[in-house]
Amino acid sequence: MLLKETTCIVCPVGCNLKIEKINDEIKVSGNLCMRGNEYGKSEITNPKRIVTCSIDNKDKIYFVKTTLPIPKSLVFETIKEIKKIPTKKSFNIGDIALKNILNTDADVVITGFHNKTL
Ligand code: SF4
């Protein structure tokens, strides 16, 4: 039984994956490497995503991302937590703005910023 057709997002190749249930086992095809096999299976059992977002403070807009993929079901809650980061604080690239967000083991790290023009 076909469960899902999707694109592997692990690397830029973007293989088209077909995920099926055959004899109670999840089978992935279309992947060029085993990372796609893992990704395809996790899309059915526990889909995860890296979350990217921004923090707006008085002078700068900071870009952030989670250091690990987090369960897809926690993406909106994660964004809510990121938006609570104090906007008066100033950061450098690579700083951890939040540790172990929502007990996922992922930190939120600053990846870039740009200055606001007044
Ligand atoms: S299956 Fe492998 S080669 Fe294909 S997109 Fe995923 S990681 Fe890249």
Image (cartoon, rainbow, N blue to C red):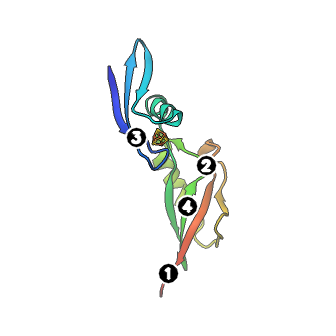
Instruction: Name the residue beneath numbered marker 3.
Output: 15
Q: Position of residue 19 (x, y in %)?
A: 38, 28
Q: Position of residue 23 (x, y in %)?
A: 41, 11
* Disc 2 to disc 3, C-alpha distance: 30 Å
Callout in the foreground (2, 1) = 1
* Disc 3 to disc 4, C-alpha distance: 27 Å
Q: With respect to residue 36, does 84 lie above or below?
A: below
Mark 1 or mark 2, which is nearer the start of the sequence? 2
The quadrant holding residue 16 is top left
Mark 4 or mark 3, which is nearer the start of the sequence? 3
Asked whether the beta carbons under mark 1 and mark 4 sit within 8 Å of each other, the answer is no
Mark 2 or mark 4, which is nearer the start of the sequence? 4
Mark 4 or mark 1, which is nearer the start of the sequence? 4
Mark 3 or mark 2, which is nearer the start of the sequence? 3
Q: Helix or strand or loop: what does disc 2 sit on?
A: helix
In depth, the one of 100 and 36 nearer the eye is 36
Callout in the foreground (1, 3) = 3
Q: Position of residue 85 (x, y in %)?
A: 59, 62
Instruction: Name the residue beneath numbered marker 1.
Output: 116
Amino acid on which disc 3 is placed: Cys
* Disc 4 to disc 2, C-alpha distance: 13 Å
Instruction: Name the residue beneath numbered marker 2.
Output: 101
**Direction bottom: furthest residue:** 118
Asked whether the beta carbons under mark 2 and mark 1 sit within 8 Å of each other, the answer is no
